[in-house]
Image: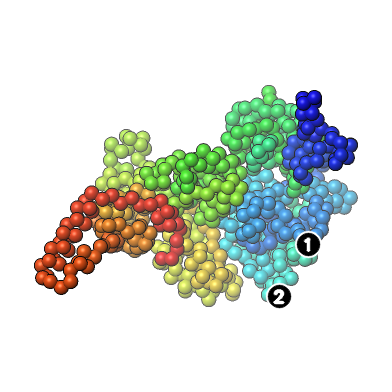
Amino acid sequence: MALAGRAVLRWGARLPSPCPAAAPLCRPAGLPAAGQRPYSSRGKEKLDMSTYPVESIRNFSIIAHVDHGKSTLADRLLEITGTISKTDRNKQVLDKLQVERERGITVKAQSASLFYNHEGINYLLNLIDTPGHVDFSYEVSRSLSACQGVILVVDANEGIQAQTVANFYLAFEAQLSIIPVINKIDLKNADPGRVEKQIEKLFDIPTDECIRISAKQGTNVEKVLQKVIEKIPPPQCNTSDPLKALVFDSTFDHYRGVIANIALFGGEIAKGQKIVSAHTKKRYEVNEVGILTPNEQPTHKLYAGQVGYLIAGMKEVTEAQIGDTLFLYKQPVEPLPGFKSAKPMVFAGMYPIDQTEYNNLKSALERLTLNDSSVTVHRDSSLALGAGWRLGFLGLLHMEVFNQRLEQEYNMSVILTAPTVPYKAVLSSAKLIKEYGKDQITIINPAQFPDKFSVSEYLEPIVLGTIVTPPEYIGKIITLCQDRRAVQKDMLYIDENRVMLKYLFPLNEIVVDFYDALKSLSSGYASFDYEDAGYQSADLIKMDILVNGNPVEELATIIHNDKAHAAGKLLCERLKETIPRQLFEIAIQAAIGKKIIARETLKAYRKNVVAKCYGGDITRRMKLLKRQAEGKRLMRKIGNVEVPRDAFIRVLKRETDK
């Protein structure tokens, strides 16, 4: 009887009252029933995508500067096509990450398929909403590879800004059709006529091609869809060709493994087919295919020219490489060119706060780098902070967002060291050239910095920066750029309200606080964008921090000779505030080689040894003080100062109160 009683309490088994006889065992709302796969697309009716031939497909992206209304326009397009219902809560529908909602910016490119009837023909429109910040330009360039055209959104109030120019040239170089859209015409200070002239002058697009809209109110948005159908060509591919699918994004699901976003450049794909990855040569069976509307919607098949998702039982995060080509088993094809790998601009050390969390952090990093492939990861270790990684990012905001996503999505708290940029050294020592196997090395960690006697020259990375600003701030901005060792290359008046400045900047001068300083000087009106411009020769040195004569490896930095004294003084002052006082005096020094360039002294705790002397001979007092001084000197010789970990964290934090 006992066994029978247990059998009744099986999950999903029927029970008498209080549950109704026909109902399964009461379970918390939202949990799956027995045998049901959690969070799957179960129960949705599968769509038949064969009704959309290649001629009626349009693949396009929305590109713009930060905060010009890309996500709002995407919301309206989703509403007009009936993809989502019209409610007041439709704000940033495609921005699914918590960090995106908190900061109000797009970080990940998101795709959605829209169905639209134009002149009696049903069209399938695949839309990709892209980020606007310079740090996420890799997302934009990847998204453009799956498109045949773009909607270039410009704010009617702000006009053309730095990232507008950069994104236009990304689309122009990819030879995509460009539809200019002037947004926010409902604002009081909007001047669409001025913006149209700016677009004509800078991009050579006639003013009559610009569409004036208000994405917030939905004014003229329907016209944008009609223009997409008329101006953007259908993809050049055929369903009769062998399967050729490009993986342009991927995410990790705990239950289903890797979900790959794919664009089909030929053939068709369906559940049950066997596919092969061109990158890993591994074989998989397709479990599910579908489109994003923007939620997953399973379909019977996906055909050439369409964009959707694929689940094929990839359990390891390394299996779904972005830029990989998928093809049918025993039908190999020439792999697609893929994407050129992102070039990291900023490097920082990442360590777990507690070393017992190392493996959990490793797993979280692997999953997050699958979703954000522009981050590079190298193993690293430190005497003070333990085992960790050296991560490469596209910029400081990218680094902050990555750290925030680790915290929110994987509940991981980490220590991030001060950001550095990748330097190069041209070696002159035959011994070192033989050791490295080349005459030029890249330095991403100050500990690897070679001695100046074995190097013919050091090189620092430079970027070509574009600043778009109202003319009244030009003087202050030029002074700021000169302070950052920048060289002016160009200056162009777009119109009477906008000036475009081009400067060559050393990357390490702009990486921490340049953007904040620029916004402060220009009351928030100036915009900034940069692109890689190679390397230039520079007078670089390695600055060590010594505590009681012992170098602290984690605080070593590579810096330009002109800035060394100021930076050394700042670091010493900050360390003086954070290292706890000892019973002996501690010297905190900044040094270049053997030369000390800055010093702070942390005074010792001192007992009042003359408190017991009430009057009496002065020699008695002097004797007691002399004995105390000798004791302190001996203690300093044998005493070992251990810089506590929280002091490292406070010093290494990216403080900009210089």
Along the line of sight, which residue is nearer the eye, 303 or 556? 556
Image point (64%, 40%), residue name: 252
Query: Element under label 1?
Result: loop
Question: Tag 1: Cα neighbours inside 10 Å, few (<14), some, or many (≥20)?
Answer: few
Look at the image and tell me whether residue 328 can be seen.
no
Along the line of sight, which residue is nearer the eye, 636 or 127? 636
Instruction: Determine whether 296 is above or below 3 in the image.
Output: below
Question: Tag 2: Cα neighbours inside 10 Å, few (<14), some, or many (≥20)?
Answer: few
Q: Amino acid at mark 1?
A: Asp
Instruction: Answer left or right for 623 relative to 589.
Output: left
Along the line of sight, which residue is nearer the eye, 140 or 83? 83
The label number, if any, that marks residue 88 in the structure image? 1
Query: Element under label 2?
Result: loop
> Residue 182: percent from the left, percent from the top?
70, 65
> Residue 587: percent from the left, percent from the top?
27, 58
Image point (80%, 24%), residue name: 1
Is there a contact, CB below 8 Å, between mark 2 and mark 1?
no
Instruction: Determine whether 504 is above or below 430 in the image.
Output: below
The label number, if any, that marks residue 188 in the structure image? 2
The label number, if any, that marks residue 631 in the structure image? none
Q: Residue furthest top?
A: 330
In primary-sequence order, the first of circles 2 and 1 is 1
> Residue 340: percent from the left, percent from the top?
55, 42
Instruction: Answer left or right for 618 relative to 140.
Output: left
Image point (28%, 44%), residue name: 454
Mark 2 to mark 1 CA distance (whole Å): 22 Å
Name the quadrant of the C terminus. Answer: bottom left
* Model colouring: rainbow
Instruction: Answer left or right for 45 relative to 288.
Output: right
* Image-quadrant location for residue 91: bottom right
Instruction: Determine whether 425 is above or below 525 in the image.
Output: above
Q: Amino acid at mark 2?
A: Lys
